[in-house]
Amino acid sequence: MNKVVVENPRDSALVLNGIEKSFAQGKNRLHVLNGASLAIRPGEMVALVGPSGSGKSTLLNIAGLLENPDSGSVMVDGKATARLKEKERAVLRRKKIGFVFQFHRLLPEFSAFENILIPQMLAQLPRAEASSRAEQLLALVGLSERRDHRPGQLSGGEQQRIAIARAVSNAPSILLADEPTGNLDPETARDVFSHLSAIIRQTKTAALIVTHNTELAASMDRVLTIRDGALSSHS
């Protein structure tokens, strides 16, 4: 395995360089990230693997502008983020980053179509444009016939496919996924991952996907392992 070196950051949608992060643990500090660096190009799928507690979720939160690093830099779609105010970070996050979690977090009182539509309406897209895109995404994840079903009427795999469609509804440059198939049986996980891959390829989204599933990790473009707070590649 080789330590990750960031090259050609201008060609990348997401760049993390020299990320350091520690947390207070009693009188000591727990160093979670120690100079972690990565760069992901548009349309590239990168798996992030490592043991529990190794810092995967922390790295994902920093990449998604949900946490600040102690030091190091984060660049999102060519924009440096270090000096942005919180409001500016929120706007950049809403426009440029989509999130998929292990648990779908769909709004239970709304239909599959509405769950995909709502983020676009919040981003002030015209209703007609948002509706058209929601229909397209439903078709892309193979759930057009389930458009009017609420989450409680969908299977676990179907709910996760809707969550993926929702995550890319505002056409983000970056998709961050935290164990998106971790709550599914192996066959359903493969099905969901197939739809996730199709969306990433068709939309040219840069994707960083945390997973414990070695089969799915091996099918991505690269695999990054986090160990002792640093990233190494074995692609």
Image (tube, rainbow, N blue to C red):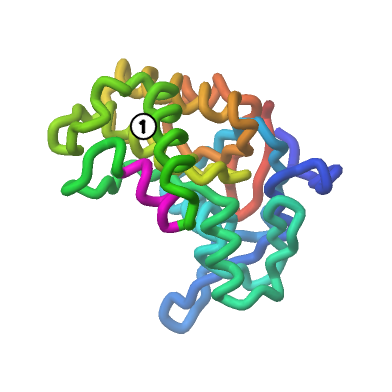
User: What secondary structure is marked by label 1?
Assistant: loop
Where, by quadrant of the figure, is residue 200 drawn? top right
Tag 1: Cα neighbours inside 10 Å, few (<14), some, or many (≥20)?
Answer: many
**Span shown in magenta:** 115-122
* Quadrant where the image shows the N terminus: top right
Q: Residue furthest right?
A: 8
Residue 40 horizontal/vertical position (percent): 69, 40
Viewer-closest of 56 and 51: 56
Which residue was labeled with disc 1? 181
Residue 172 horizontal/vertical position (percent): 57, 45
Horizontal relation, residue 164 to residue 111: left or right: right
> Magenta region, mostly helix, strand or loop?
helix
Where, by quadrant of the figure, is residue 158 drawn? top left
* Quadrant where the image shows the C terminus: top right
Question: Which residue does the image show at 26% across and 23% down from the upper left?
Answer: 185
Question: Which residue does the image show at 58% across and 38% down from the upper left?
Answer: 207
